[in-house]
Image (cartoon, rainbow, N blue to C red):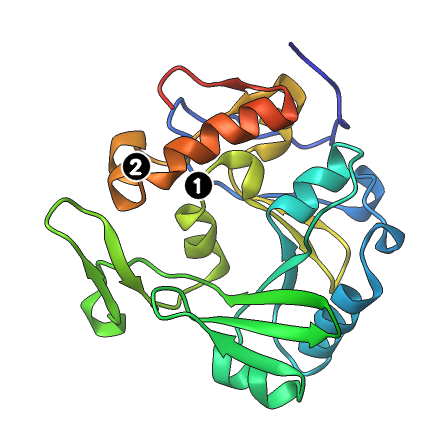
Amino acid sequence: MCRKIFAPTSKNEHGSNGEVKLNIITRQEHPISRSHISDNALKVLYRLSNHGYDAFLVGGGVRDILLGKEPKDFDIATNATPEQIRALFRNCRLIGRRFRLAHIMFGRDIIEVATFRGHHQEPEKNQSAQSKEGMLLRDNVYGTVEEDAERRDFTINAMYYNIADFSIHDYANGVQDLNAGIIRMIGDPETRYREDPVRMIRAIRFAAKLDMKIADNT
């Protein structure tokens, strides 16, 4: 199965393990418009950006818009810490122990904002814990947007829409896999499944929901 979402002029190839390598797709090369994004999500993106923080629409919101679907949720990733996010929004509450997240409340509409995740193996940043089997038990380690992309599960969920210039930062050739209809794990699948076994169920759910094929190694 192959479905053309759009064809940016610059293309990067990745190996079978979905290695992370940045490909910036300019506004002129992709179909996402701010009209596709909810007003509340735009308010959060712009306030973060106007206060000097990186602000990206990320994951399913970007994926679904590119597929011509209406996103169920609009999730945002930023380099602002949860405490810095809370200082900007009076309607913010922080939740979670394993993953510290900020929820910006607009009545019943909740915009979830996550700080970029780093690698849990870095002891100087360490607020994480793993089981002996490799499962992540606590994971409040912050990092760069590149590290955050490496920590995401599938290539089609590692695309970031940058509110600063309306470009898409595609870190694992997610557009290529969307076009090909492939669910591909980022990194070594066995390691990633040990970190979070629910990823196996997510792979099956995405394949069924989006009518896509799971890559053999995934």
Left or right: residue 160 versus residue 129 is right
Q: Residue furthest left?
A: 132
Dot 1 crowding, Cα within 10 Å, few <14, some 14–19, many 20+:
many
Dot 2 crowding, Cα within 10 Å, few <14, some 14–19, many 20+:
some
Q: At numbered mark 2, what does the secondary structure look like: helix, strand or loop?
A: helix
Q: From what the image shows, is residue 78 above or below residue 26?
A: below
Where is residue 17? Give x, y as percent: 37, 28
**At 51% across and 35% down in the image, what residue appears?**
155
**At 64% across and 9% down in the image, what residue appears?**
1
Where is residue 176? Give x, y as percent: 61, 26
Where is residue 190? Give x, y as percent: 25, 31
* Number of numbered discs visible in the structure rendering: 2
Q: Quadrant of residue 87?
A: bottom right
Q: Amino acid at mark 2?
A: Tyr
Q: Quadrant of the C terminus?
A: top left
Pointer 1 residue: 153
Foreground of the two, 114 or 163: 114
Q: At numbered mark 1, what does the secondary structure look like: helix, strand or loop?
A: loop
Q: From what the image shows, is residue 26 above or below residue 112?
A: above
Residues tagged 2 and 1 counted as in contact (Cβ below 8 A)? no
Pointer 2 residue: 193
**At 18% across and 47% down in the image, what residue appears?**
134
Q: Amino acid at mark 1?
A: Asp
Q: From what the image shows, is residue 144 above or below residue 174?
A: below
Left or right: residue 210 versus residue 144 is right
